[in-house]
Image: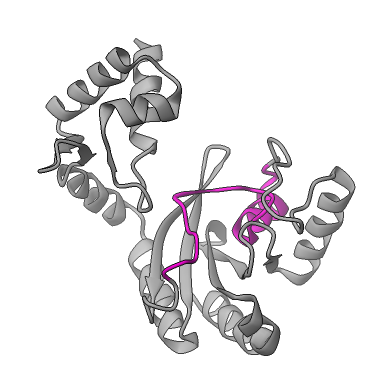
Amino acid sequence: MLDTLQKSAQILKQFTSTHPEWGSRELAAHLQQPKSTVHLHLQALTQAGFLRKTPRSKYALSWRLLEFSTHLHHQLGWYQEAVKAMQDLAQEVRALTYLCVLEGQDVLCIARAHSEPEEHREIQTDLYLPTHATAAGKVFCAFTGLKVKQFEVFTPSTITTPDEWETALNKVQDDHYALSLEEWVADSCALAAPLYFEEKLVAVMGLQVKTFRFRNQRNTLLQSLLQTTQNFW
């Protein structure tokens, strides 16, 4: 039973903003699992209301999940205010902003705001973020004790050794914010800072811009981010 639930959960995690639809054959190849097994899980998830069939005969997340999302947001006393603050920051700095939480040992991006969608079309923002290569991941590691599973290389700037990582975390703890300078996506830099509610770290808010803009506006972007997070509640 547990194994079945874990496989179903793994399948649901594949439906992201960058890949919202999957065919059974395509998903089976992606997961390196038998097509018949994946197809059975897709059918079961559809019957349970978690997935739906699209006009292209593929699978996508069901609208019913919005109901669960709404219930969760009401349970979190900080969420609505955090999203509004994130959206206001996006308008202020004219950049992509995001909100992340810690789900077990994973950094999960739960919300994003785009002030100018065309500008950010090519910026990568997946649902689950690599811990060691993102500003949000560094913040969680610095202030929650989250550990890096492996130092996967994404770009020539990615941190790949424990010594480099320890130095980076010490700086985050001293500065109370984190940088990611082309460490996950080439020509893309990010800033992130912790978000506290009732004296607890509940989320991380950040922004992401192209490298050229970051080099020219780093201090201004950082000031806007810190003003938002420090005055959050």
Placement of 73 over or under 36, stated as above or below = below
Location of residue 176 in the rendering, given as x and y in whole percent from the top left corner: 71, 68
- Residue 221 figure quarter: bottom right
Q: Nearest the camera: 13 or 64?
A: 13
- Residue 43 figure quarter: top left
Residue, far top: 1
Q: Does residue 209 show up?
A: yes
Residue, far right: 163
Q: Nearest the camera: 19 or 168?
A: 19
Location of residue 117 in the rendering, given as x and y in whole percent from the top left corner: 36, 76
Q: Residue at x 80, y 67 (%)?
A: 174
Quadrant in the picture for the N terminus: top left
Residue, far left: 55
Placement of 97 over or under 42, stated as above or below = below
- Determine whether, in the image, residue 115 is placed left or right of residue 101: left
Question: Which color scheme is applied?
Answer: one colour
Location of residue 38 in the rendering, given as x and y in whole percent from the top left corner: 31, 20
Placement of 19 over or under 120, stated as above or below = above
Q: Which residues are magenta?
A: 121-146
Q: Residue at x 85, y 44 (%)?
A: 162
Q: Residue at x 81, y 51 (%)?
A: 165
- Determine whether, in the image, residue 54 is placed left or right of residue 212: left
Placement of 36 over or under 109, stated as above or below = above
